Amino acid sequence: MSRARSATTFPSGKIKILLFENIHESASAIFANHECTVETVSGALPEKELVERIKGVHIVGIRSKTQITKRVLEAADYLLAVGCFCIGTNQVDLNAANRMGIPVFNAPFSNTRSVAELIMSEIVMLARRLGDCVRELHTNLWNKSSTGCHEIRGKVLGVVGYGHIGSQVGVLAEMFGMRVIFHDITKRLPMSNSREVESLDQLLAESDFVTFHVPATPETNGMMQAEHIAKMKKGSYLLNASRGSVINLEALAEALKSGHLAGAAIDVYPKEPRGNGPGFESPLVGLKNVVLTPHIGGSTEEAQENIGVEVATACMGFINKGTTVGSVNFPQVEMPLKPGAHRILNAHRNVPGVMAEILKILSSHDANIHAQNLATDEHIGYLVTDLDQSVSDDVKMAIAALPTSIKTRILY
Ligand code: NAI
């Protein structure tokens, strides 16, 4: 039988995909394009049903409600990858998946534009006191006034955390004629005319609007306390759509009541309700010129569509090329495909002597290696080897038989 084939791909026609929780159809379209069989389930299943349903499935796609526990992973006899079509991944037992050689992908950046656009709209809302106007008119109160209302053109926007979202906010703000300064703990390239300042204090002292786009870390936990808010300009505005742990909301409420700050827009809270319905509480409720939104910064249909594309593409990249870059629980490898070679993907326990055994196998088969890439973490190693087509099947079987091998796959 001739094993020499021109392209290096997995037989995706045989791949079975199971998608839960109404994942956007942009994902199914990508999987279908690769001729995978796609099944969908509208909600999440309890563990007992999931362990049955996941049998024979190669890729499972979930959002935040489906729990991929160790038991589910153990029942998943053919599972190659998990796609979390959302940002968070704590609904998956990441350690168990790692030990079983199953990478987990998510979409951390697909909704960044949505957040940036929300912030821009809120800057205008705060400057024009739109929240109060809308509320008053809905209670039949006509209150036309220009007092305390401003253009944002020429005003200084201070961006704290100049990453994916912060830098986009900066670019959009400049289009409105704002002057943008930023502070980040990592050296960041300024976009268009924005300017990096030396410290958070300097940013707080210079800005008319301060917006936070930092991750949740021990350093950002409570980084805006009363003493920091006091360093902001009188009559300035504070916005946070990053994480609820960043700003002390009691201190913010005091600064708004005293008139030190002219307004605030908050999308994230230290404690957020588990589901939709009444019962939201915050010291900011009822205060003037305060825009409160229920953590909807990244919640747009466009973001859902982008998430579908990003995660499905990552899963197919792993299926067809073995690429694990972007996975949250796996050693990261990305290697361009070599025409004329076959690719062996091997996840193994990270113990001494594994590579020596694998190299022994390659050498005993006289296999000519076209390219090889190994990445490891504390528990597993992930080795991608491109080699001669003539010996690839035998080499794959020998590597798979090693007691240290967890998962071994070949791409033709
Ligand atoms: P990113 O990782 O691209 O950027 C974060 C930036 O903050 C990085 O440049 C980092 O160096 C910087 N940073 C970290 N610690 C800092 C500190 N102590 N001081 C100053 N800068 C610091 O993250 P991305 O995608 O821009 O997201 C930012 C935040 O927005 C995250 O917390 C994320 O969870 C949140 N988010 C909120 C959404 C919502 O619905 N409201 C939706 C999406 C993201």
Image (tube, rainbow, N blue to C red):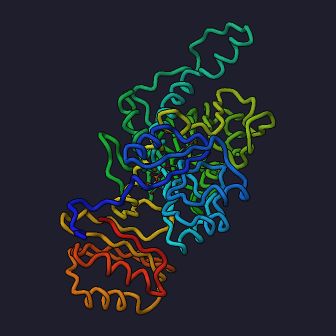
Q: Residue at coordinates 22% horizontally, 69% vertically from top-left? A: 2
Q: Position of residue 180 (x, y in %)?
A: 39, 39
Q: Quadrant location of residue 249?
A: top right
**Residue farthest to the front?**
1
In this view, the residue in front, 377 or 409, is: 409
Q: Residue at coordinates 40% horizontally, 75% vertically from top-left? A: 346
Q: How many marks?
A: 0
Side of 122 where 390 appears, left or right: left
Q: Is residue 17 visible?
A: yes
In this view, the residue in front, 170 or 178, is: 170
In this view, the residue in front, 227 or 313, is: 313
- The relative height of residue 273 versus residue 398 in the rendered view (above or below) is above
Side of 115 where 392 appears, left or right: left
Q: Position of residue 231 (x, y in %)?
A: 57, 46
Q: Quadrant of the C terminus?
A: bottom left
- The relative height of residue 400 versus residue 333 in the rendered view (above or below) is below
Q: Residue at coordinates 40% horizontally, 39% vertically from top-left? A: 170
Q: Position of residue 224 (x, y in %)?
A: 61, 51
Q: Residue at coordinates 44% horizontally, 59% vertically from top-left? A: 185
- The relative height of residue 138 versus residue 328 in the rendered view (above or below) is above
- The relative height of residue 395 versus residue 172 in the rendered view (above or below) is below
Q: Position of residue 335 (x, y in %)?
A: 28, 66
In this view, the residue in front, 27 or 268, is: 27
